[in-house]
Image: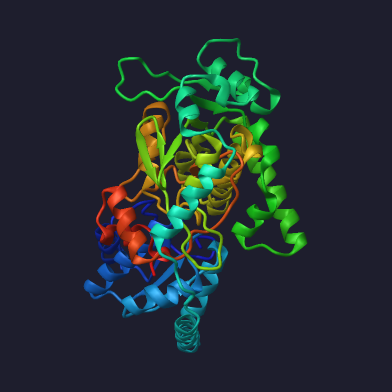
Amino acid sequence: MAVGGCEIIDLGVMVEPAAIVAAVQEHHANFVCLSGLITPSLEQMIVVIRELRRAGITITVIVGGATTSPMHTAVKMAPEYDGLVVHSTDASRNMQIITSLTSPTARVFAAGILADQKRLRELYASAQDRRPLADYRERLAEAEFQRQLSPAASEEKVREGEHQHKLKSEPERSFLAAAEGEIPATAPESLCLANFEISERYSPAQSFPPQNVAGFHHYDIVAVERHIDWDMFCAEWGVKKEEDKKQLIADAQQMLERLKRENILDLQGVIATLPVHVEGDDIVVQGLHLPMLRNQTIGEDNLSVADFAAEAGRITFFAISAGVGLKQFAEGLRKDGDEYGAFMAKVLADRLAEALAEEVVPAAEGERHAFGYPSCPDHSLKRDVFDLLQVEHLTNMRLTDSYMIDPAESICGMIIPGARYFAVGRIAEDQLLDYAHRRGISPEIIKTLIPRNIQ
């Protein structure tokens, strides 16, 4: 947008609604742009919109990001505001929206957006999923019966093996043993142990020290870049034409070379493969309960992440980041007027985070289940895993009160052997109340954490 002649007031990430309102008033802004990468961001956007409305502000709000959509904007956001709320598919689209809303035909453009949003609200109302939901307790009882029939390791076997390496594959044993100083750091090439440094370890004096936790810093980008998904990279830019893709990727390769040459990004993380057992739909790891949700839709598979954990007896938990160092670098580019380069570095860091997860997490044996995704939609579980792995002690990653990871170019999740991907979907009130009890959180707060799953 700066390239298009706009003056940008960059407030950064995870900004309080009151600060956004104050900045709008101080700078006499013409537009507000909000971006959301995870589900809690959607709720925060609505809070911001309500605060703008309360302050009597009606300037156009442009929303975008991975979790946003035209439907959500029309149904959940637009009705909360007296001004216009516009969904943008990507950053390059923002300038087109602003140009249209400052042109002589602005009223026609705005009227078209309002008409489209009204149509989407009507479509949403008519297309609500009305498939019946099963009784939660019956679904859980059925799953527990199936677990008893499963040839998987029993809970007793898992507990007996809690301090043994038998539950880990040979590459994982070598990787974690090297991290603990038990053997030379000669892990299989795929893990590239030589490419990063092990950070400080747990001490016996700590009250809750997980076994076999490996923290690392300065992972070599050269080992990671082969996993970059360039199709997803181009999608983040909204680029579809092949010629445009080639030019964009060429620019990205130049930026990637600079990131490597100047050691701008510190790729870091924590990984731990730990024995687990299940109690109902809770995954239990070293005494910590991680409640999971179960699909209740009649006609769909009766699945919970807990089912796969019961079968596997172990889970690889991880938190990784490719965003440490990005903020300072991007700010420097912006000061030099290079908005294109700043955004390029940010999108590359996003893709490098995914690539780093592919590189260091043993995904070959099961699907990756990230917190906030359809199979495990509750973002607040990140706090439990961050504490379990002592992520904030071993790395520069921090978790905000709204469960966003700072830097944003980070991933927290788990790999379960034999697991496959699925969606929890809508849950009924019986499971909502049960889950709230297991989480120790009020049902009203749970509704804000998993709004898309509430009936």
Determine the residue located farthest toward the right in the rendered image: 243
Residue 163 seen: yes
Q: Nearer the viewer, residue 431 or 7?
A: 431
Question: Residue at horizontal 57%, vertical 37%?
Answer: 152
- In terms of image quadrants, where is residue 73? bottom left
Left or right position of 98 against 32: right
Question: Residue at horizontal 29%, vertical 65%?
Answer: 47
Left or right position of 87 against 44: right
Residue 102 seen: no
Question: Residue at horizontal 61%, vertical 14%?
Answer: 185
Q: In which quadrant of the rendered image does the C terminus lie?
A: bottom left
Horizontal and vertical percent position of residue 282: 40, 44
The answer to whether residue 414 is above or below residue 101 is above
The answer to whether residue 174 is above or below residue 271 is above
Q: Nearer the viewer, residue 167 or 61?
A: 167
Left or right position of 258 against 339: right
Horizontal and vertical percent position of residue 76: 38, 73
Q: Nearer the viewer, residue 262 or 234?
A: 234
